[in-house]
């Protein structure tokens, strides 16, 4: 089942999990695997039931409670999720992910002060987790502690330079407070510095960059300048598309890269109002994705 899941063959993984559950209905491990398989095909309510059975079958398993909490929270039931996460923590108080999960649940209930405390506990147990630092940064943003949030996003990027979402949230943490204070010139300068920083990172999605920069500019009330950034992004991504087309014959990875680049072109063109060209690139994107 695990191999099928890693290959993204989720329907086959679910079929295998269901068959295993028919043979071993009283196994907590089998029911937990069934919950994962159901979750992967977006059958979340059934996944909650399966993880709930796993907890019932093995009430001494912190792992069962932890995963049930995660799935219940995804299903939009923070009350059940919180109770399960608390039990997981009582069974295994040093597990960093349990503290992190409690932070996520607190965020879903808009209790950001509690989320900050839980994320800090998770980081104290696993300080090298980029994900933990990133989510702490988000919680700090929600309560308006922008400088502290930016520091956490920077730490997340130091630990994992490929965590693109942390780079995007770093821009928010830097620009929004300037915009709120009416410091538009400083906000514009920050965006310019951010673009140079973003281009130095291992990821290279120009479409994501242009989207995030445009978002930041709207916060800073500089939206007319966003047009120039989008035009520049389009030029860069068009150049990359030419390179990707030359390399597309080298295998699925390069074909997927071309698909991503064509999608970026479509995004930029769409935002610039070139609807006809945008549709043409979407069709090319679809063909490249199918080929990969």
Image (cartoon, helix red, strand yellow):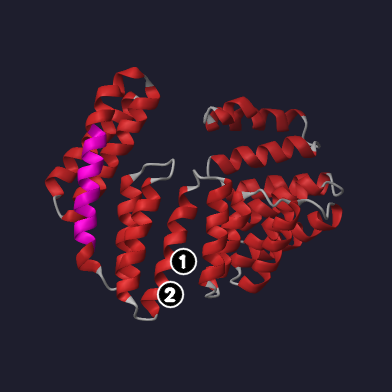
Residue 125: x and y, percent? 75, 53
Q: Residue at x 56, y 40 (%)?
A: 40
Is residue 94 left or right of 158 when viewed as pictured?
A: right
* Quadrant the C terminus occupies: top left
- Residue 75 in view, yes or no: no
State whether residue 141 is above or below residue 87: below
Label 2 secondary element: helix
Is residue 146 left or right of 229 when viewed as pictured?
A: right
- Residue 287 in view, yes or no: yes
Residue 131 is marked as none
Is residue 253 left or right of 133 when viewed as pictured?
A: left
**Residue hosting label 2:** 177
Residue 109 lies in magenta, yes or no? Answer: no
Which secondary structure dominates the residues rendered in magenta? helix
Q: Nearer the viewer, residue 255 or 212?
A: 212
Q: Residue at x 24, y 56 (%)?
A: 229
Q: Quadrant of residue 211?
A: bottom left
Q: Quadrant of residue 265?
A: top left
* Quadrant the N terminus occupies: top right
Task: Spot the residue most to the bottom.
Answer: 181
Q: Alpha-carbon distance for marks 1 and 2?
A: 7 Å
**Residue hosting label 1:** 173
Label 1 secondary element: helix
Q: Nearer the viewer, residue 226 or 255?
A: 226
Q: Which residues are magenta?
A: 226-241
Residue 239 lies in magenta, yes or no? Answer: yes
Q: Nearer the viewer, residue 14 or 108?
A: 108
Q: Residue at x 24, y 43 (%)?
A: 236
């Amino acid at each position: 089942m695990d191999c099928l899941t890693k290959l993204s063959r989720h329907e086959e993984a679910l079929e295998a999990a269901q068959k295993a559950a028919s043979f071993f209905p009283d196994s907590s491990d089998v029911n937990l695997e069934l919950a994962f398989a159901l979750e992967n095909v977006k059958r979340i309510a059934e996944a909650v039931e399966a993880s709930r059975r796993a907890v019932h079958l093995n009430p001494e398993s912190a792992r069962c409670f932890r995963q049930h909490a995660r799935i219940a929270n995804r299903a939009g039931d923070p009350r059940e999720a919180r109770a399960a996460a608390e039990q997981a923590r009582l069974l295994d108080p040093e597990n960093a992910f349990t503290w992190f999960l409690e932070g996520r649940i607190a965020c879903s209930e808009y209790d950001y002060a509690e989320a900050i405390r839980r994320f800090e506990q998770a980081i104290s147990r696993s300080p090298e987790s980029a994900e933990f630092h990133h989510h702490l940064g988000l919680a700090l943003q929600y309560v308006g502690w922008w400088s502290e949030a930016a520091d956490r996003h920077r730490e997340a990027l130091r630990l994992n330079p490929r965590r693109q979402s942390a780079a995007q949230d770093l821009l928010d943490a830097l620009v929004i407070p300037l915009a709120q204070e009416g410091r538009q010139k400083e906000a514009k300068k920050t965006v310019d510095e951010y673009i140079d920083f973003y281009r130095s990172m291992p990821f290279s999605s120009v479409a994501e960059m242009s989207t995030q920069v445009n978002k930041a500019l709207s916060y800073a009330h500089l939206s007319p300048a966003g047009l120039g950034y989008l035009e520049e992004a389009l030029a860069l991504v068009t150049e990359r598309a030419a390179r990707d087309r030359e390399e597309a014959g080298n295998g699925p990875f390069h074909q997927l890269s071309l698909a991503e680049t064509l999608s970026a072109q479509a995004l930029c063109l769409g935002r610039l109002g070139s609807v006809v060209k945008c549709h043409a690139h979407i069709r090319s994107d679809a063909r490249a994705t199918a080929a990969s």
